[in-house]
Amino acid sequence: MKSNLLTNSELSLFCYQLSLIFKSGIPLDEAMSVFTDEMSTPVLKKIAEDIKESVSMGEGLHEAIRKHEEFPKYMVGMIEIAYNTGNLEGELERLSNYYQELERLNQKVSNAITYPIILTGLMFIVIGFLVIKVIPMFNNILQSIGGSMPQATNMLINVGMTLRNYGLIIVAVLVILGFALYFYTKSKSDAWRYNTPFIGEINKKIFSEKFALGMSMLMKGGYSFDDALEVYIRSIESVYATSALKKAQKNILEGEDVAQEISKVNLFPTLFTKMLTIGYKTGELESSLTKVASVYKLEVEKTMDKVTSSIEPALVIILSLVVGVILFTVMTPLISIISSL
């Protein structure tokens, strides 16, 4: 993923303003001047000026937009599809709503995890202080009066000593592992997005909605399934998904069954492939894709709402259990000390 991509809010604003241009009925040259003036940030204004210049020189809107790497591949591909099928105004409005919804979802996830993360950080600081400083002090006091620490507390003391002696090394290793994980997730091999339990299921639903929407739009515009698949593949950002669909496309062009080849691709839930198979066998593939798109739009919304509403309570429960265990191991030697006095 390129680091210079626009934010979801900026993408939503760009698509919304552009959709208004086509709704206004103003001649394109004049409309593009208005569009440029309406851009509220320097980055968007510069992009709008470049697009205006390209359009004035006779380029198609989708060609002018494709020149800018600031835009996601999915957005560029869907605008090209809409341009070719005469549905540009409606698709720009949908993309605006799509990126606005992504921004809302990201904000919702951020809000759901911010408080637990802050609480977790503070608690680990307190726990670290107890393990490294307080518990060893009680251990010395208890040993001076002839007492002994419980086994669980001794384990915490050993952890504390390890953190005290090798803390910087442990932090360095964790940082290195964090960077390694980050670069792995950003590498060309993104198969993990679709093969990881739970995360893979969510990504498959999201991909199914996008695929069904793009393919149904193309087929409504008069494209055959084969030609629509060729155009849609160009809009896919995932390297793994692109490779998988290209392999299916090759087999389809060689005469293999469409529904069977799509079902072999590890990108779609079972329900999707069954609905696609029924649509293909009944000759209603276009309407089946339209229905699938609406079904998985609702599926994605429900799944993400469920995930975001579960994050905070799940983190709080885990944190409470950890703190409870720590407090128990701390209180046990305190009670022993008191009873020994």
Image: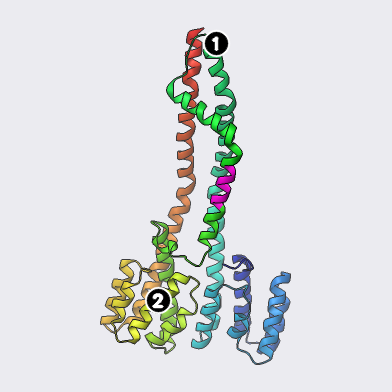
Q: Which residues are magenta?
A: 171-178
Q: Could you say where residue 211 lies in the image, as x and y percent from the top left?
A: 42, 74
Queried whether the magenta region covers residue 103, the answer comes back as no
Tell me: 271 left or right of 209: left
Which image quarter holds the N terminus?
Answer: bottom right
Q: Nearer the viewer, residue 205 or 266?
A: 266
Distance between the alpha carbons at the discs numbered 2 and 1: 72 Å
Residue 144's mark?
A: 1
169 lies above or below 149:
below
Neighbours of disc 2 within 10 Å: few (<14), some (14-19), many (20+): many
Q: Nearer the viewer, residue 159 or 252?
A: 159
Q: Tell me the kind of residue under disc 2.
A: Leu
Magenta stretch secondary structure, dominant: helix
Which label was assigned to residue 245?
2
* Placement of 320 over or under 202, stated as above or below: above
Q: Residue furthest top?
A: 341
Label 1 secondary element? helix
Q: Is residue 175 magenta?
A: yes
